[in-house]
Image (spheres, grey):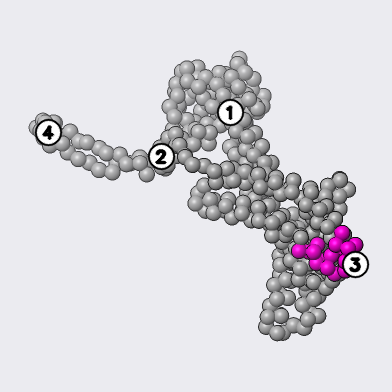
Amino acid sequence: MYSALSRVYGWVSRHRELLTVSISGSLIAAAWVLRGFGRGTPLAFQILMTVAAFVAGIWVAREAIGRLLAGQFSIPLLVTIAAVGALWIGEVWEAAAVTFLYVLGGYLETLTLARTRAALRTLIDLAPRTGRVKRDDGVQVVDASDISPGDVVVVLPGDRVPVDGVVLEGRASLDTSPLTGEPLPHEVGPGDLVLGGSVSQVGYLEVEAQKVGADTTFSRILYLVAEAQDQKPKVQRMLDRFAAWYTPLIIGLSVALFLFTRDIELSLTFLVIGCPGALVVASPVAVVAGLGHAARKGILIKGGERLERIGKVDVVAFDKTGTLTLGRPRVSGVEALGIEAHGVGGLASPPVEFSLRPV
């Protein structure tokens, strides 16, 4: 029983944002449906909207209090005050709307982050874990982290090269697509440089390690991708700076309006109207929509900042045909040149021209 409850609690904790958005959104939808079909009383509408505002607002309030204790005037603080004010004057729909929009924006932002982290995990899975190192007593399989510069690494077919280095002996065909994007295998021999993370398809290599661990090209790619995960889009950073002065400004104006008019309902209405719920949700919605649409087209964009930069691109330069094609050339046609020649047994063997069409 305890184990089952622990699993349920763990699942709820992991999907807290999804549950909050789903429950709050369902309550709001139910309230409008009942009202639209005339099957609910005004009291039922009020109750459903109030519960929806409470379900979403409790998390917004926790975030607002946490940031306030850290000395930050944030959008969650404004949303919390606006929701409480809306409930105070009886505008339950506005209270539910501002809190739901904020938690929806946070959930969509989490989805964006999860998508980019999934791409990072895919890259990490490609990192070599072990390597075959030539020792005095033979070839030993060791952890990639235990390989030092100057060690001679043996690479067999199917092995992932664990270091950046230079080929001492042997020849092999390496798949470098995880690093360079080049779909066709790359032939290497003595004196050629190889990159860690490449996969040997056929052949035998002895490679002198030059860069190991965090110094390899593959590790630096991982670092750059991980760094990109923490970079918010410019518009999101602008919204964070905007909230630092906008929140106290709206609260101050609302208080000033109350002191001038002595009308609490008017000042609370101004506070609710000034709450930028749609503005807060706009950035994560745009980022998720853009990344999702690109992913469906087979394009992986590493974060919202990169997506934002694409909007300013005027010219795109492609450095290899593999970027635009699948990199699997095939014979698309055979054409005889019509030149007579004598082959085996006196049969004519005209030269043949082949044309390759990339796909």
Which residue is painted at 45% across and 21% down in the image?
Answer: 189
Q: Is residue 97 magenta?
A: no
Residue pointed to by mark 4: 339
Q: What secondary structure do most residues of the magenta stretch adopt?
A: helix
Pick whichever of labels 1 and 2 is earlier in the sequence.
1
Indicate the amino acid at tag 4. Answer: Ile
From this view, report whether residue 77 is shown above or below residue 130.
Answer: below
Indicate the amino acid at tag 2. Answer: Gly
Q: Secondary structure at mark 3?
A: loop
Which residue is painted at 68% across and 52% down in the image?
Answer: 109
Quadrant containing the N terminus in the rendered view: bottom right
Which residue is painted at 74% across and 54% down in the image?
Answer: 14
Nearer to us of marks 1 and 4 is 1
Pick whichever of labels 2 and 3 is earlier in the sequence.
3
User: Cβ–Cβ below 8 Å for labels 4 and 2?
Assistant: no
Residue pointed to by mark 1: 217
